[in-house]
Amino acid sequence: ATHSIDTNTYLYANLWSKQVTGFTRQELIGKPVLQFIHPDDHDKALAYHHEAINTGQRVEFEYRLRIKSESASPAYSAAHSSCIFTQGTLVVSTRLSEMLHRQPS
């Protein structure tokens, strides 16, 4: 996926994004990135994004990613992401870990 650094929204999501999150490209593009990150991980994720932007280096980090759920409460999975800032865009590659848990509403 790629993120706008100005609006912190998804600019692009490949077809693999649905396999990883359960959300379609249409459900991701234009939405705030933080909408799909566990609230307790917002500051950490933003700090890593800024590190990639400021250094131009690839940065890797772990956080909890929201995945599509049939339940009314959000579901999250542990995720490992790698991000790099290139040509004015933050490019993020994510893979999920094994755990899945639900957050109370």
Image (tube, helix red, strand yellow):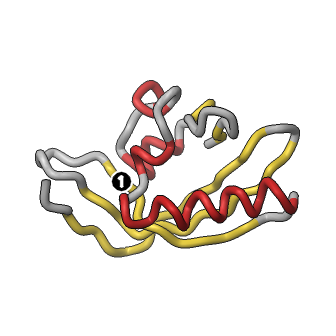
Q: Position of residue 99 (x, y in %)?
A: 32, 74
Q: In this orientation, which residue lies closer to the viewer: 17 or 11?
A: 11
Q: Position of residue 22 (x, y in %)?
A: 35, 44
- What residue is at 66 percent from the left and 35 percent from the top? 4
- What residue is at 15 percent from the left and 45 percent from the top? 70
Q: Is residue 20 visible?
A: yes
Q: Is residue 92 above or below residue 43?
A: above
Residue 13 sits in quarter: top right
- What residue is at 22 percent from the left and 48 percent from the top? 69
- What residue is at 23 percent from the left and 52 percent from the top? 74
| Amino acid of disc 1 | Arg
Q: In this orientation, which residue lies closer to the viewer: 89 or 12?
A: 89
Q: Position of residue 66 (x, y in %)?
A: 35, 53
- Residue for badge 1: 66
Q: In screen coordinates, is 41 left or right of 48?
A: left
Q: Is residue 11 above or below residue 70?
A: above
Q: Position of residue 101 (x, y in %)?
A: 23, 68
Q: In this orientation, which residue lies closer to the viewer: 17 or 33?
A: 33
Q: Is residue 12 visible?
A: no
Q: Is residue 31 above or below residue 103?
A: above
For the N terminus, the quadrant is top right
